[in-house]
Amino acid sequence: MKKLLLLTTILAVSACSSDDGNQSEEMNNNNAMDTAAAVSDEVMRWEAQAQNITIQRDNWGVPHIYGKTDADAVFGVMYAQAEDDFNRVEVNYMNAMGLLAQAEGESEIYRDLRMRLFIQEDEMKRLYAEAPDWLKELMVAYADGLNYFLYKNPQVQPKVIKRFEPWMALSFSEGSIGGDIERVSLADLEQFYGGTNTMASADINLDRVDWEPRGSNGMAIAPEKTKNGKALLYINPHTTHYFREEAHMVSEEGLNAYGALTWGQFFIYQGFSEYNGWMHTSTRSDVIDEALETIIEKDGKLFYKYGDEEREVKVSTETIEYKTDSGMASRDFTIYHTHRGPIVREQDGKWVSTQLMNIPLTALNQSYTRTKTKSYDEFYEMMRLKSNSSNNTVYADKDGNIAYFHGNFHPIRDTQFDYNHPVDGSNPATDWQGLHTVEEAINSLNPGSGWLYNTNNWPFTLAGPDHSPKKEDYPSYMSVNFENPRGEHALGLYPGINDFTVESLIEAGYDGLLPSFQRFVPVLKAAYDANPDESIKEAVDMLVAWDKRASMASVETSLAHHWGNELWKLLPRGRDVDPYDNYTYIEKMVSADQYLTALKDALAKMEADFGSWKVAWGDMNRFQRNDGNITQTFDDTKPSYPVKLASGRWGALASVGTRQFDSAKNWYVTSGNSFIASVEFGDKVRAKALMAGGLNSDPSSPHFFDQGEMYGKGEFRDVHYYKEDVDANTQHTYHPGE
């Protein structure tokens, strides 16, 4: 089928307009005076609100924001975020609103286009106008806090966004910046809308030898399994390092939330109050569907078949501006939508539309409301908003409840169709039929095991074999993932502990076992016994004797990671299966000779890089921060800290994405454990936490890398939650703008 694309490329260099000869000098002067007065009024409003807000920075640089109203707390937290890392705040909104190319150039055009297919300025403005007054007030405060920061800090020059508007808060209203949208293939998008396919490398490639699984860990422990008889929550998101700010938001309207929030968001996304706590892990519920659309061209218009109807395709133009060596240019794209969503690619002569959750106003409502719930019943009611499609939720509270929610957005589908592949868009029966209720979703409340967990794995082992939801009780699309090595690890660990504390929960979360090598090493031993080779005997013996636990002093950990990378190279390419199946393939399908050759290759690489294969894990696995850039450049000659954490690919719970970069021989950690907290609920909440590296992006700040060594060792600090404790550990108190 001939593509019906009306793509036009326009190169347009921005230029300042000349004076309008039709306007008199007097009118220009009057307009200038009116503008100046409006600006002055706005500044006066900002400064007045700032006096209602107090920011207390503690000994780790964590901002504790106290305001009279929730809007004050929002204003303050945005100002504090901008102080710590305005660049990341702006970049996140550039990404969310499809503005990256204006700063980064032509290479980001299709990433911007992908966001614009779903997030459109006019729609955000319409939703803002429809928002309830209380939420609209918070969105105004969000924009005011950032704009006041820019006003007070003229030395900070935004790359693109010179002024923030309240409606912009709707552009990423969950915890992730792009959320489900980022699962749309950039390569497919470029091929469809650009006629090329040069960006395939921009998509996630599970076959890379240094691939690191995305996601997080969440654990909740019931009172009967704790030493103090109080519920515990382990908050352990895995993100890129420096992805989130740590903050504490307090108001006289009942807000008192502590935790992590993605740069630019005004709500605590993973955290706790004195009443309860919440941790999100990435879900694999099937919440994105594709439909094959039959396109008909008639009288210069495009239509798609839908039952007996021929519905008109919505056609619009999206202009993507991008930076060039000489200034700015733009490219116009003609984009297409059906009632399901945008067209993203072509398959078998048909256009493919994508349908996913796109209810940003409801999502923002839910994200903020979550932080003010005071009981399990209130939390459950908040979940009825059903607007968190990309995350599971692990929960604990002061009443002793622990709970799990597998996703929070589940479209109802006709199960006669296979939604793992594009369905026939011309058949109305393939449409979504509303949403499942919270009661119908995969949930668990106070399981008999006394504990529950999620590691981005399936929910059918979340509380052990006797207390978990049963797969057969739910539609298959509610959970399309399988077990993973971290889940395997947790399932073997948590049942054996009966006296959890804040400290021992951290210890369990940092358990160094790498269960994948419990599978692989026996296969290696059998292969070696069948074909002994003196050149690798010492390495084989070490791996066999090894307890399969990562530690800084362990040579075996270093060797296992290199050997694992070589085994990963043996996987068939382009297999459309869950990554967990890769481990079974390596264990069962890789030949004995390949096992031995992979080990030889690993030894050779280590000797080439380090002069010897006997390199301790902490000597080669390092944590370094040289500047405030989002993408770090690593240098073996510069200071760094050893890291005991290992890759989640092999089952490490406290995991890091670690690999070798072109600029260095050592491996450097760039993702994984980010903000981590262990929280105990009771008459008073008690918590310990750790942040990857430090909160401030300025190398001259004392909080640039003050937690770097602690991160490598897994040493936690006390959280300052109550006012008296905050006061006792405050290093700087001020109002925004001071």
Image (cartoon, helix red, strand yellow):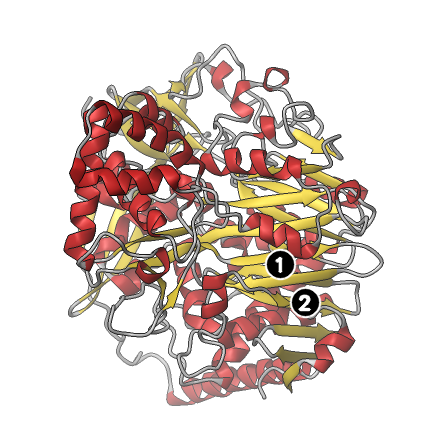
Q: Residues within 10 Å of mark 1 (few under 14, many from 20)?
A: many
For residue 249, the mark is 2
- Say which amino acid is labelled 1: Ile
Q: Residue 316, how many percent across, how many down?
A: 35, 42
Q: Is residue 504 rendered to the left or right of residue 527?
A: right
Q: Secondary structure at mark 2?
A: strand
Q: Which label number is shown at residue 282?
A: none
Among the two numbered marks 1 and 2 on one chain, the one whose residue lies closer to the N terminus? 2
Decide: few, some or many residues near mark 2? Use Cα within 10 Å; few <14, some 14-19, many ≥20.
many
* Residue 733 higher or lower than 250, as above or below: below
Q: Is residue 190 above or below residue 305?
A: below
Given residues 430 and 2, the one toward you in this image is 430
Relative height, residue 256 to residue 602 (above, below): below
Q: Amino acid at mark 2?
A: Met
- Where in the figure is residue 1, as x and y percent of width and height? 20, 21
Residue sitting at x 56%, y 74%: 80
Q: Is residue 480 left or right of residue 362?
A: left
Q: Nearer the viewer, residue 581 or 611?
A: 611
Contact (Cβ within 8 Å) of mark 1 with mark 2: yes
Residue 311 visible: yes
Q: Is residue 204 visible?
A: no
Task: Locate residue 709, reporting x and y percent.
Answer: 46, 69
Front position in the image: 134 or 518: 518
Q: In the shown orientation, is residue 386 left or right of residue 263? A: right
The dot on residue 268 is 1
